[in-house]
Image (tube, rainbow, N blue to C red):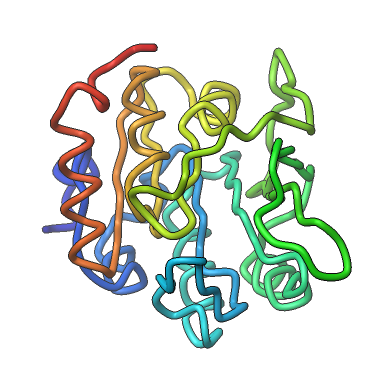
Amino acid sequence: MTTTTAQTVRNTVLHGDSVALMRRLPRHSVDFILTDPPYLVRYQGRDGRTVRNDDNASWLKPSVNQMHRVLKPGGFCISFYGWNRIALFAEAWEQAGFRMVGHIVFRKKYASSSRFLRYAHESAYLLAKGDVQVPRHPIPDVLDFDYTGNRLHPTQKPVSALRPLIEAFCPPGGLTLDPFCGSGSSLVAARSLGRDWLGMELDAGHVATATHRLTTGEGRAAA
């Protein structure tokens, strides 16, 4: 991969450390970022599966710095986060130069876990780089979150919940980047809307899953 043009790395899933991969992208080459990074909570699913780098925050600030660098001025980033690690995420976003301009709650019809409360939602922040324009049709800050069964990834997000985000904040023909793409749900959503997409993933197995989804009927569907 070279840094001569962003066009050379569109519509593919790259295997490797996203910090290193983003450093090789041109500055201001991405229209929108949608990502679901590790929550820093040592997650372990009911089936024992875990998420790589969920046990340390050494990658957080470097990755956010690179996301800010590659995002075009006036662009948006939506990042899921761990609610009980918000101080770490907020510090990284603010130090990189992002402004928190919105908060999105994804309501589930089920509880993913239960302790003091039954956890029946996911959360993400809408981050802005520089002077941004208000969307012509703002989306609700509460969206439904269909159950995926986490069949393809320990924390698999539903495409149906991601499509409205891309439609609202990535311009037609624009490039959506997910530096922690997992099984590729954000990329499938972007492709189904006619946006270009670029995924990065550290785990080779998830790279294979995402690539398969994007080269089969699911990645080509417009529904």
- In this rendering, the answer to whether 57 lies above or below 104 is below
The count of marks equals: 0
Residue 74 placement: quadrant: top right
What residue is at 36 percent from the left and 45 percent from the top?
A: 29
Nearer-the-camera pick, 21 or 154 = 154
User: Looking at the figure, which quarter contains the N terminus?
Assistant: bottom left
Measured as percent of width and height from the top left, residue 91 is found at 73, 75
- In this rendering, the answer to whether 194 lies above or below 10 is above
What residue is at 59 percent from the left and 69 percent from the top?
A: 39
What residue is at 51 percent from the left and 66 percent from the top?
A: 46
What residue is at 53 percent from the left and 21 percent from the top?
A: 167
Measured as percent of width and height from the top left, residue 68 is found at 53, 59
Measured as percent of width and height from the top left, residue 101 is found at 79, 45
Relative placement, left or right, of 79 versus 219 is right
- In this rendering, the answer to whether 42 lies above or below 158 is below
Nearer-the-camera pick, 29 or 223 = 223
Q: Residue furthest right?
A: 116
Residue 191 placement: quadrant: top left
Relative placement, left or right, of 86 versus 147 is right
User: Looking at the figure, which quarter contains the C terminus?
Assistant: top left
